């Protein structure tokens, strides 16, 4: 009997020791987990991983330690190890929602939208009020053009959280892509009236109005969005095209400056285009600076040399070297010959003016070239040739030609 009691006492002591050691182990695992979190926040990812490993070694089922370790791997762009850690949790507990959600985020970043949908549907099945999962699910559906399911998810979120206006903006995008334009515009109007995501709503509404061929209204909406510093590269290109088509110089300048500053700082063509607009606005000194930038980006850019020469001529600076450089780079650049002709008119060198304008007309018979050659003929008292050239200029819709024709030829 005494032996049995002694054996029982030994077993109790051993069991108590085991339980106490496990309690201490659990506390230690948590301590290592906290240290790992602090290391992660300090961006010391290697030490963070080391401490999460220690936590896991003390508690194999410490799911959050695996997931935090996965975050560390993502932070150092080791995607395969991150996915491996997430999968370890799912293998230990198949329906663990935080792991499924994190893996869905991983799939979304990898553009594996169908895999993301599978994981997110499992998360939502467990808890239909897990709003971040439903939002991500809507985005996944949207990215595979399953607009109806995306709309269903967003409508659920709006019904649950009517003051979360980001969902209203998302619904407007979905309705726009479903060509349910009235519904999309209705949501945009609500956002604008509430001043929630208003600039995004202006841009989106403008895009819809453009598709409906309501160009003036679309332009106004784009202008409001851009004025409030909301734009994308695509929006700026659309806005630039609309502005230039309607000869809206200030808007064209604004679009180009934003494009160059934010997206295309080394695009020589945009610098050239901006220089041309600045010339039209009579901002010649700024135009010269911009056109020099175009040339520095593309040293053999003959057209940029022509407009640089033009800007200089218009403020009485000598353009001759720039225009000759343009012709050297491209002997068929008719505009360079036009500009040389106009320069020689200003210098009263009419023979050289006539030669260069005639060359320009042979290369490309523009109304502008005919008009200026007519001026040379008139200055040389050759009314017949002047009127013939002015008639040609009129036919080519050069505006100044009609006034000159009435004065010289009528």
Image (tube, rainbow, N blue to C red):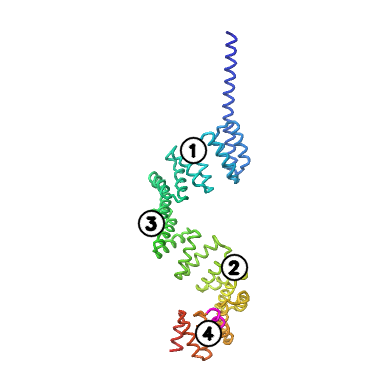
Q: Report helix, strand or loop for mark 1.
A: helix
Q: Nearer the viewer, mark 2 or mark 1?
A: 1
Q: Report helix, strand or loop for mark 4.
A: helix
**Would residue 149 appear left or right of 38 to someone viewing this image?**
left
Query: According to the image, label 2 marks what residue?
Result: 293
Give residue 268's position: percent from left, percent from top. 58, 67
**Is residue 192 visible in this depiction of the protein?**
no
Give residue 148's position: percent from left, percent from top. 41, 49
Alpha carbon distance from label 4 to label 3: 54 Å
**Which numbered disc flags the more N-terminal residue, 4 or 3?**
3
**Which numbered disc flags the more N-terminal residue, 2 or 4?**
2
> What residue is at 58 percent from the left and 17 percent from the top?
11
Alpha carbon distance from label 4 to label 1: 80 Å
**Would residue 119 appear left or right of 58 to someone viewing this image?**
left
Give residue 56's position: percent from left, percent from top. 59, 33
Query: According to the image, label 1 marks what residue?
Result: 97
Q: Which mark is residue 181?
A: 3
**Which numbered disc flags the more N-terminal residue, 2 or 1?**
1
Q: Residues within 10 Å of mark 4 (few under 14, many from 20)?
A: many
Q: Which residues are magenta?
A: 358-364
**Would residue 375 appear left or right of 46 to someone viewing this image?**
left
Q: Residues within 10 Å of mark 1 (few under 14, many from 20)?
A: many
Q: Which mark is residue 373?
A: 4
Q: Nearer the viewer, mark 2 or mark 4?
A: 4
């Amino acid at each position: 009997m005494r032996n049995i009691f002694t054996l029982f006492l030994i077993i109790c002591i051993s069991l108590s020791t085991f339980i106490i050691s496990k309690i201490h182990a659990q506390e230690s695992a948590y301590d290592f987990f906290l240290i790992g979190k602090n290391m992660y926040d300090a961006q010391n990812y290697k030490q963070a991983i080391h401490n999460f490993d220690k936590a896991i070694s003390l508690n194999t089922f410490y799911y959050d330690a695996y997931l935090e370790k996965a975050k560390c791997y993502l932070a150092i762009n080791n995607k395969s190890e991150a996915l491996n850690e997430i999968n370890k949790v799912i293998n230990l507990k198949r329906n663990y929602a935080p792991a499924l959600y994190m893996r869905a985020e991983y799939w979304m970043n990898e553009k594996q939208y169908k895999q993301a949908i599978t994981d997110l549907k499992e998360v939502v099945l467990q808890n239909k009020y897990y709003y971040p999962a439903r939002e991500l699910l809507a985005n996944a559906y949207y990215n595979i053009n399953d607009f109806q399911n995306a709309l269903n998810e967003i409508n659920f979120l709006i019904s649950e959280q009517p003051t979360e206006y980001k969902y209203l903006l998302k619904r407007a995008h979905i309705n726009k892509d479903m060509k349910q334009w009235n519904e999309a515009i209705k949501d945009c109007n609500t956002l604008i009236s509430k001043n929630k995501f208003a600039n995004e709503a202006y841009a989106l509404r403008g895009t819809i109005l453009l598709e409906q061929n309501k160009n003036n209204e679309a332009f106004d909406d784009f202008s409001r969005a851009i004025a409030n510093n909301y734009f994308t590269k695509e929006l700026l290109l659309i806005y630039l095209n609309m502005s230039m088509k309607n000869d809206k110089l200030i808007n064209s300048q604004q679009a180009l400056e934003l494009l160059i500053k934010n997206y295309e700082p080394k695009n020589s063509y945009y610098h050239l285009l901006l220089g041309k607009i600045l010339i039209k606005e009579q901002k010649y000194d700024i135009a010269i600076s911009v056109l020099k930038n175009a040339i520095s980006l593309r040293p053999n850019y003959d057209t940029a040399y022509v407009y640089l020469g033009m800007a200089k001529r218009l403020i009485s600076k000598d353009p001759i070297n720039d225009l000759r450089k343009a012709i050297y780079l491209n002997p068929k650049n008719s505009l360079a010959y036009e500009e040389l002709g106009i320069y020689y008119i200003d210098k009263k060198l009419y023979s050289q003016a006539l030669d260069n304008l005639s060359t320009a007309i042979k290369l490309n018979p523009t109304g502008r070239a005919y008009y200026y050659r007519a001026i040379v003929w008139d200055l040389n008292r050759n009314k017949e040739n002047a009127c013939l050239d002015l008639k040609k200029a009129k036919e080519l819709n050069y505006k100044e030609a009609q006034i000159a024709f009435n004065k010289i030829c009528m």
